[in-house]
Amino acid sequence: MTKRDEAFDQANSHLAVGELAEAEAKYREAVAHDPEFFDGWHALGMALMKQGQIKEAIGCGLQATNLQPNDLLAWTALSQMYVQDEQIAEAEFAKGNARILSLGGKVQK
């Protein structure tokens, strides 16, 4: 198992028992080992959002959608992050991309 995967598994274990700060630290470690790790960026963004760190969560959400522009869950999460930050136009854009994907379409990178 790679260091990235070890950190990610540990983060998921922390998340499962509600240890958000510990999960965040391990997700950060995972993406530090592999900056192209989609699952790590997505999970880090969600952990940050749950802790109210919305601006940073949005950055992670954008990174996730850049890495996998046709991931429905990533666009849905990004839309939720924008809503929490009261960026309604951006939230609608992300929601629109999620809708395109849910109907079987593709998002251009």
Image (tube, grey):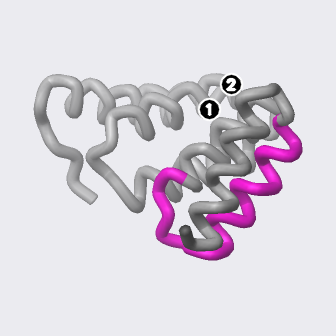
Judged left or right of residue 92, residue 109 is left
Judged left or right of residue 93, residue 20 is right
Judged left or right of residue 96, residue 60 is right
Q: Main secondary structure of the magenta part?
A: helix
Q: Residue at x 65, y 61 (%)?
A: 6
**Quarter-wise, where is residue 31 in the image?**
bottom right
Q: Residue at x 27, y 46 (%)?
A: 70
Q: Residues within 10 Å of mark 2 (few under 14, many from 20)?
A: some
Q: Which residues are magenta?
A: 20-39
9 or 71: nearer the eye? 9
Q: Mark 1 = which residue?
A: 81
17 or 80: nearer the eye? 17
Cα gap from disc 2 to disc 1, whole angstroms: 5 Å
Q: Residues within 10 Å of mark 1 (few under 14, many from 20)?
A: many
73 or 83: nearer the eye? 73
Q: Residue at x 58, y 62 (%)?
A: 5
User: What's under tag 1, amino acid-wise?
Assistant: Met
CB atoms of marks 2 and 1 within 8 Å: yes
Q: Please check the rendered image and state whether residue 90 is part of the magenta-colored stretch, yes or no.
A: no
- Residue 66 image point, x, y percent: 41, 59
Label number found at residue 52: none
- Residue 42 image point, x, y percent: 55, 46
Query: Image quadrant for the C terminus?
Result: bottom left
- Residue 86 image point, x, y percent: 67, 26
Question: What secondary structure is marked by label 1?
Answer: helix
**Quarter-wise, where is residue 96 in the image?**
top left
**Quarter-wise, where is residue 17 in the image?**
top right
